[in-house]
Amino acid sequence: MQNFVFHNPTKILFGKGKVSSIGEETAVYGKNVLLVYGSGSIKKNGLYDQVIQSLSSTGAIISEHPGVQSNPILSHVQAGIQLAREKQCEVVCAVGGGSVIDEAKAICAGTTVQHDVWKFFTGKKSVKNPLPLTTVLTLAASGSEMNSGMVITNTETSQKFGFANKHLFPKTSILDPTVTCSVPADYTAYGAVDAIAHVLEFYFTSLDPYTPVQDRLMEGLVMNGMESCDRVLNKLDDYHARADLMWTATLALNGLTCAGLGKVGFPMHMIEHSLSAFYDVPHGAGLSAVIPGWLRFHADLGPARFAQFAERVFDIREGSVETKAEQGIKGLTAWFEKVGSPTSLTALGIPQADFPRIAENGMALAKVWRMKDYNEQKIEKILQECI
Ligand code: NZQ
Ligand code: ZN
């Protein structure tokens, strides 16, 4: 167990009917609200009306910034910052999935500074006093509702970069599983893959040889992610399955799993972000295409860890450490296929001829994330494992 500080200030209101609290939770931080949301799912499922009613009931003055796209882009963030300034917004309220919450965090950070918000993403500036943020989560996936990270694509440079800053935790996030019942099967699966990937990143990059507390927590989250996703795909409006998947995804990236692991990395995401930047693939779909290859590339470096994962998550008991490691990767890949998430770059239609530029793009992020054990050749080798 390594030394650590665990401090997560986000207040979570979890459960059926909790959306009606967004007004009073937001009013704590001001009357002038910037409401940020996506391309319309909240209007179709009735959530928009509930949120407007709750915000208005506290006398909020609401300016709307709709149109956040999946894999949110810098130019739309900049438009949101301009609107927040013009309307002198005091608080931002995000209603959506990870894309909406991430864009809202970037708006919070960029509204209170004079320099371009992209400087935060390239590590040239750090966040000091952003606007406060409240959220209503509508898709179980990113964990953005209870963490301080965000990911934005600069379409001019084709860079999808992310960073975290302790001032950017949402003040309050409302997690009502009911509002996720309208998420279609494909994005439900992509979200579960993303949540599982957040666990795998720490599980397979931790260098501490003995972390039984964190291991069991992470293995349990992977099992819950798969099991609750299966139940949801069986019945899209299964409230308890949606609740289990929602809380699993939040716990997967709120700092709890990596506390005590020491230095960990996010390499699968580093590679996936280039896929989403270039091809605009859904984040979870990009991850399921990269994870099997990344695991195969690394399995022989530490087969015991992979064998432990196979034994505890897939109950694989027979064979050598190497065989178990291989069976565990096969078990995870088979589950990705079962839920309809692509398991190769070929399935995403990404040609091998593009691998050099994907590797070059990934390295730009690896540099910002100070991933010293990566270079373009290594990324290309991993991409070859993902064909
Ligand atoms: O445009 P809207 O109306 O929001 O529709 C969305 C979008 O089309 C739709 N959707 C969301 N909730 C719905 C719904 N449709 C019906 N009913 C609902 N209740 O689903 C589509 C995908 O939404 P999106 O927000 O893009 O998905 P997700 O939550 O997976 O977020 C993906 C983004 O999160 C970032 C990714 O990079 C990606 O940009 N991540 C953020 C992280 C963080 N902040 O810590 C970490 C993650 O690794 C990830 O990188
Ligand atoms: Zn992710």
Image: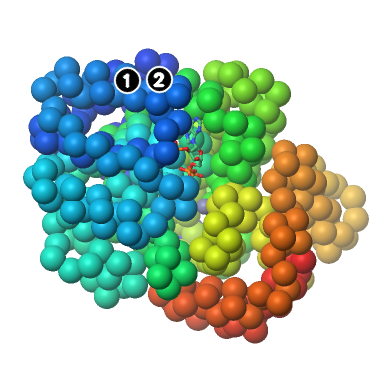
- Identify which amino acid the numbered label 1 is placed on: Asp
Per the image, label 2 sits on a secondary structure element best described as: loop
- The quadrant of the picture occupied by the C terminus is bottom right
For the view shown, which residue lies furthest in the right direction? 319
Is 192 left or right of 349, judged from the image as shown? left
Whole-Å distance between the Cαs marked 1 and 2?
6 Å
Question: Are the two marked residues, 1 and 2, in contact with CB atoms closer than 8 angstroms?
Answer: yes
- x and y percentages locating residue 100 in the rendered image: 38, 43
Q: From this viewpoint, is residue 148 visible?
A: no
At a point 25% along the width and 64% down the height, the residue shown is 117
Q: Which mark is residue 341?
A: none
Dot 1: few (<14), some (14–19), or many (≥20) neighbours within 10 Å? few
Coordinates of residue 2 in the picture (x, y in percent): 45, 62
Which residue is located at x 70 percent, y 57 percent? 348
Q: Is residue 280 above or below residue 184?
A: below
Residue type, label 2: Gly
How many marks on residues? 2
Residue drawn at x 12%, y 36% is 32
Residue 292 position, x and y percent, is 73, 59
In this figure, which residue is indicated by the disc labeled 2?
Answer: 46
Q: Is mark 1 within 8 Å of ligand 1?
A: no
Q: Which residue is mark 1?
A: 49
Q: Can residue 123 be seen by looking at this rendering?
A: yes
Q: Tell me the SS state at disc 1.
A: helix
Q: Residues within 10 Å of mark 2 (few under 14, many from 20)?
A: few
Residue 331 horizontal/vertical position (percent): 79, 48
Between 212 and 225, which is closer to the camera in this rendering?
225
Image position of 95 (left or right of 158)? left
